């Protein structure tokens, strides 16, 4: 049997952070419930970032609390792993107070994106991670790391492969358990992705690498397949292809969860997700955010 892949669902964070319509906590928790009911085991449910910068992520503490309440009631499976994004110590303290057991830190591979996204240089962002990592250790919280603009920056253009490899090593040394390699503006192609991951796996074990592809230029599925063929088994996706990045002009959402699941299932590779349930969730989310979702499979479903 071919190896299974793990899907890390981004819709409630990467997806919603770029939507004009801000969804209330109740709706976001209902989406989380339905995602877990469709088999999602790892999901990022929000971000402890400044609400002045990203108002869509306000209410994250409430979402974590309500999601845990549903776990307690047996509505959401016990083993579900909820994560939240944190940019600094303040975000980490909020995460600890919420009771969440996993957080994600994020750094950019280009200086201009770092400044626009988190108002500091790349070096400064790594300094901010030090107290975050110390608190994580003390409170036994798992930390995932993201590297953004790995294949291109909306302000600087091309990003050097060597820089990405260096930053991945630096992030791994901090003690993150996994590094998600982000094509923030969906500019990569399959050839580049293959080369990048071949080099990355020489410095970070491939089991600890994830692919995070935005589908801005329609290349995400090809890029995922290229990464999979090099040994990557963890992919970040958003229900319906929701979202983008508020600080990456023109960026569209992560590749749609349903499109990725459709591809892998078609190839006989397990994801553990129920495609029909994901497709069924599309209309509810589209209605809430007040526009159709870009997912292809989400629109037409699967052949019976
Ligand atoms: P800043 O303005 O430089 O922060 O923002 P500051 O330290 O100068 O503080 C200013 C105010 O913000 C203070 O409040 C702080 O308390 C508050 P005031 O005294 O004015 O009332 N503050 C916070 N409030 C809530 N939560 C916090 C926090 N920290 C400080 N954690 C900051 C710096 C990092 C906070 C800001 O730039 C920010 O929140 N940025 C987040 C941007 C963001 O969320 N971007 C999207 C996620 S990244 C992404 O999508 C890429 C990814 O998907 C991968 C990929 O696709 O490549 C991960
Ligand atoms: Mg992203």
Image (cartoon, rainbow, N blue to C red):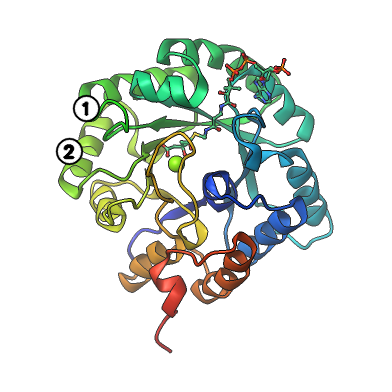
How far apart marks 2 and 1 lie (CA) works out to 9 Å
At horizontal 24% and vertical 46% (from top left) the residue drawn is 230
Closer to the camera, 196 or 53?
A: 53
2 vs 1, front mark: 1
Instruction: Answer above or below: position of 282 versus 133.
Output: below
Contact (CB < 8 A) between labels 2 and 1? yes
Q: Splitting the image into 4 quarters, where does residue 287 fall?
A: bottom right
Numbered disc total: 2
The image position of residue 300, as x and y in percent, is: 42, 79
Q: How dense is the environment of label 2, judged by Cα within 10 Å: few (below 14), some, or many (20 and up)?
A: some
Q: Residue furthest bottom?
A: 304
**For the residue labelled by badge 2, is the local secondary structure a helix, a strand or a loop?**
helix
Q: Indicate which quadrant contains ligand 1.
A: top right
Residue on which the image places disc 1: 161
Which quadrant of the rendered structure holds the N terminus?
A: bottom left
Q: Give the left or right position of residue 219, taking residue 58 as reference.
A: left
The image position of residue 222, as x and y in percent, is: 24, 56
- Where residue 138 is drawn, which disc sits there? none
Residue on which the image places disc 2: 195
Instruction: Answer above or below: position of 118 versus 244.
Output: above
């Amino acid at each position: 049997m071919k190896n299974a892949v793990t899907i890390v669902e981004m819709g409630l964070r990467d997806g919603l952070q770029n939507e004009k319509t801000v969804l209330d906590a109740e709706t976001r928790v209902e989406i989380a419930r339905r995602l877990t009911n469709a088999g999602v085991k790892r999901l990022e449910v929000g971000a402890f970032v400044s609400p002045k910068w990203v108002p869509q992520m306000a209410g994250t503490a409430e979402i974590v609390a309500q999601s845990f309440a549903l776990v307690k009631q047996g509505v959401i499976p016990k083993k579900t792993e909820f994560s939240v994004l944190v940019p600094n110590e303040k975000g980490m303290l909020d995460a600890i107070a919420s009771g969440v057991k996993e957080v994600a830190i994020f750094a950019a591979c280009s200086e201009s994106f770092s400044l626009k996204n988190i108002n500091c240089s790349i070096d400064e962002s790594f300094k901010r991670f030090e107290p975050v990592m110390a608190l994580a250790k003390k409170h036994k919280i798992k930390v995932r790391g993201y590297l953004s603009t790995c294949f291109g920056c909306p302000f600087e253009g091309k990003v050097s492969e060597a820089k990405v490899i260096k930053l991945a090593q630096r992030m791994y040394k901090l003690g993150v358990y996994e590094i998600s390699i982000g094509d923030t503006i969906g500019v990569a192609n399959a050839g580049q992705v293959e080369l990048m991951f071949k080099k990355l796996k020489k410095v970070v074990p491939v089991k600890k690498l994830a692919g995070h592809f935005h589908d801005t230029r329609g290349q995400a599925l090809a890029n995922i397949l290229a990464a999979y063929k090099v040994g990557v088994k963890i992919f970040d996706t958003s229900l319906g292809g929701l979202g983008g990045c508020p600080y990456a002009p023109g960026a569209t959402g992560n590749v749609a969860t349903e499109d990725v699941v459709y591809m892998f299932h078609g190839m006989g590779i397990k994801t553990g997700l129920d495609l029909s349930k994901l497709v069924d969730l599309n209309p509810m989310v589209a209605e809430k955010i007040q526009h159709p979702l870009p997912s292809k499979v989400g629109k037409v479903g699967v052949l019976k």
